[in-house]
Image (tube, rainbow, N blue to C red):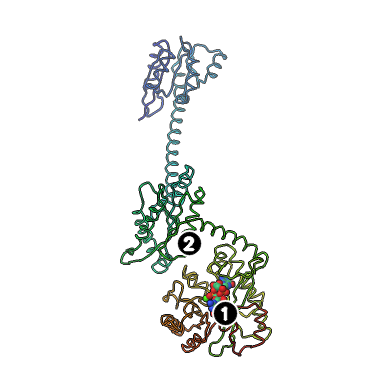
Amino acid sequence: MSSFSLLVVDDQPANFDVIEALLDSPRSRLEPDHTYEFHYANGGQSALDGLAFTRPDLILLDVMMPGIDGLELCRRLKAMPEWSSVPIIMVTALDSKQDLARCLDAGADDFISKPINRAELVARTRSMLRIRRQYLQLKDFNTRLEGLVNERTAQLQRLLFVDTLTKLPSRAFLMQELAAACQDDHPQLAVAYLDCDAFKRVNGAFGHAVGDQLLVAIAERLRGQLRPGDLLARMGEDEFCFVLFHAFDPEAIERWVEATLETFLSPFIIGALQIPITACVGLAVGMQVSSSAEAILQAADTAMYKAKQQGKGSYKVFDTALHLATLDRLILETDLHRALERDEFVNYYQPIVRISSREIVGFEALVRWRHPSRGLVSPDAFIPCLEDSSLVVPAGRLILRRACQQLRLWHEQGWPGLTMSVNLSAQQFGSKSLLNDIDDILAETGLNPVSLKLEITETAVMGDPEAATLLMEKIRQRNIQLSIDDFGTGYSSLYYLHRFPIDNLKIDRSFVDQVEHSSRNQKIVETILTLGKELGLAVIAEGIETEQQLALLKGLDCEFGQGFLFSCPLPPAEIDLLLKATGTGRPLIQLC
Ligand code: C2E
Ligand code: CA
Ligand code: CA
């Protein structure tokens, strides 16, 4: 049961007694379920002084009082935020319209005429208390709602700012902290960006549940490396980032990075599994780079990317040379945009021969960039950048279209048996438009799909083996052949190989190189050939440069080959001449 506090302000105590007597009797039946406390003040000032104690829910206020009179007190109360909502009933002997208007003007909610009539007093008090009760309920409801909203907001903030899997701070949180630190001009700030090596392989081999547990274990080890006051966040899938707020000594920081990488030396134990994994770190130190959070993070990311190129488990510090390399890359990217617009990409074609007879059986399309000032640029110089940009899909489409048009032409000119191999980058292979593009190009050129071979790398399919298999099946339903390029260099997964719907294996040229001198390479080539036979795949050896290599491959029963010994990649006009000179069926000899 709650209680209402009624304050009567009147210079004559007798009036209080009357009001109390009238209201406090059971007959008056004010608000049910409430008790009443009556307070009395004999003037305006004492009413104001006693507010904190009386805490009124309703005030009955005499108009005519010495000192602060009723109207003035009413005005003042209505101006006090804490008390403005308390209903005020003016008790007055004056009842001209003008007097009442003045009461209302002062903020009064109602009035009662003197001498006090019981029925009127009870009715008006009751209605004011009802209003008061409703107001209090609403206020209570609002407070609860506000609490709920605050709680929910805090919860969302926590979700947003905490990575749910590892319970580490999130990227959003790190960005906020880093931005704040940059504002404070933290010259000793360093950022270490860590990315696990070949993490996808773990997911691929053991499933996502194990992958998740591994991430939690990694986060735990990294937490152990956290220095007091520093920050560690999970940035993405298998990426973590440290912000070191007091990196005074660059050498000490490098030692710390080395120690952090050493925590990966022992394998992670997940249930019954022991999973070895390494990571690369890119380090950016605040004073070397511009001071925005994004720029520092970008620098650390660039350094990490470079570390990856150095090999698993390495780290790299961002320096000016790297900065310039990044700029170079930006320039390159703009240049590539222009190259596509100005049609500067051209296809060269390298013959693929049957090893036993050296006859040309087909070609591999290899793109070149005819740069207005740099001349002919080889793909190794721009394909990686192309693959990082959104250009890879339109550029790849162009290369495929040209190659198909060209082969169709050679078919028409009298060599219908030739095939065309076209390289697909991982990004292109993963792109949604690939199948549509292929269908369009085949329809447009009228090329028989049987003569088209698409080359993809192991890396491109290992990212998501299930999705890759589906896509490969769709490609093969179109009677197009699939080849695994650079076989043996990627995340070679023999286990998966037999599950992939493929037709050809291309032995990477690093194994063919020195095959005549290196027993290791010879062993690898032999193994790939045996594997090919087991799985019913055609095998093509890349990069054959010498007669000895050719003889050895022939001895091992390798069916197809490609390399400078036969021909380097050539523009179409020169292939025309070559075809006319040798035809198919005639051996191709040393043209490079
Ligand atoms: P890849 O697919 O392994 O292509 C074979 C590379 O080996 C070509 O280099 C070719 O010129 C070179 N090569 C051929 N025979 C020999 C030889 O006897 N000795 C040596 N040392 N090298 C030989 P290229 O044309 O510079 O292409 C390099 C890489 O660029 C290609 O490697 C391929 O991964 C990529 N690439 C080329 N064209 C395209 C393309 O149109 N699309 C995509 N996505 N990638 C391409
Ligand atoms: Ca290739
Ligand atoms: Ca290759």
Report the front residue among 339 and 94: 339
Count residues near mark 1 (Cα–Cα under 10 Å), then give few for <14, some for 14-19, many for 20+. some
Position of 380 relative to 86 (above/below): below
Residue at the disc numbered 1: 479
Q: In the shown orientation, is residue 557 left or right of residue 340? A: left
Name the amino acid, label 1. Asn
Horizontal and vertical percent position of residue 165: 39, 56
Q: Are marks 1 and 2 in contact (CB under 8 Å)?
A: no
Name the amino acid, label 2. Lys
Position of 319 relative to 153 (above/below): below
Report the front residue among 495 and 360: 360
Horizontal and vertical percent position of residue 519: 41, 82
Q: Residue at x 50, y 20 (%)?
A: 110
Element marked by disc 1: loop
Question: Sequence-wise, which precedes: disc 1 or disc 2?
Answer: 2
Whether residue 504 is visible, yes or no, is yes
Residue at the disc numbered 2: 306
Whether ligand 1 has any atom under 8 Å from the Cβ at mark 2 is answered as no
Whether ligand 2 has any atom under 8 Å from the Cβ at mark 1 is answered as no
Element marked by disc 2: helix
Tag in front: 1 or 2: 2
Horizontal and vertical percent position of residue 22: 40, 17
Q: What is the count of numbered marks?
A: 2
Horizontal and vertical percent position of residue 239: 43, 58
